[in-house]
Amino acid sequence: MTYIVNDKCIGCKYTDCVEVCPVDCFYEGENMLVIHPDECIDCGVCEPECPADAIVPDTEPGAEDWVEFNRKYSELWPVLTTRRDPLPAADEKDGEEGKFEKYFSEKPGEGD
């Protein structure tokens, strides 16, 4: 099992999860995070830290597509190991439906 980040992260990019990850497997895009599924040790400490409930185990329904999505972008984006402020519109976008189609960006974030 591994954990993944889904589209609930888009536009919010809360980084509380990054701060507790013991293996630094989070990678930063312009407006979301992903987890490298081969680096995740399945400890689960990140899941309850996400205010947007964007981190789920790969056993959840619909998560299988997100595993490959997380793998792809974790190989393109820089690692993030330090907690940062969420995106400015995070409170407005938290819980919004259809965020992938509206907001997803392939651009990398700054990383550490």
Image (cartoon, rainbow, N blue to C red):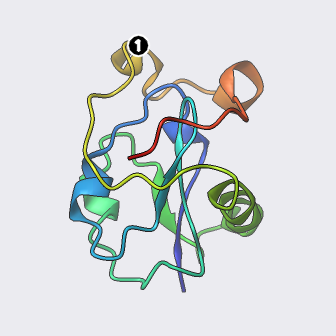
Quadrant location of residue 64?
Answer: bottom right
68 sits left or right of 3 in the view: right
For image coordinates 55% across by 33% down, the residue present is: 10
Q: Is residue 91 above or below residue 52?
A: above
Label 1, residues with CA under 10 Å away: few <14, some 14-19, many ≥20: few
Q: Is residue 103 above or below residue 51?
A: above
For image coordinates 61% across by 27% down, the residue present is: 97
For image coordinates 69% across by 29% down, the residue present is: 104
Percent position (x, y) of residue 33? 51, 46
Percent position (x, y) of residue 102? 72, 19
Residue nearest the observer in this picture, 93 or 15? 15
For image coordinates 39% across by 22% down, the residue present is: 87
Q: Is residue 105 above or below residue 78?
A: above
51 sits left or right of 80 in the view: left
Quadrant location of residue 89?
Answer: top left
Percent position (x, y) of residue 42? 42, 83
The reply to whether residue 98 is visible in this rendering is: no
The reply to whether residue 28 is visible in this rendering is: yes
- Determine which residue is flagged by label 1: 89
Q: Is residue 2 above or below residue 106?
A: below
Q: Secondary structure at mark 1?
A: loop
- Exactly how many numbered labels are in the figure? 1
Amino acid bearing label 1: Ala
Query: Which quarter of the rendering shows the N terminus?
Result: bottom right
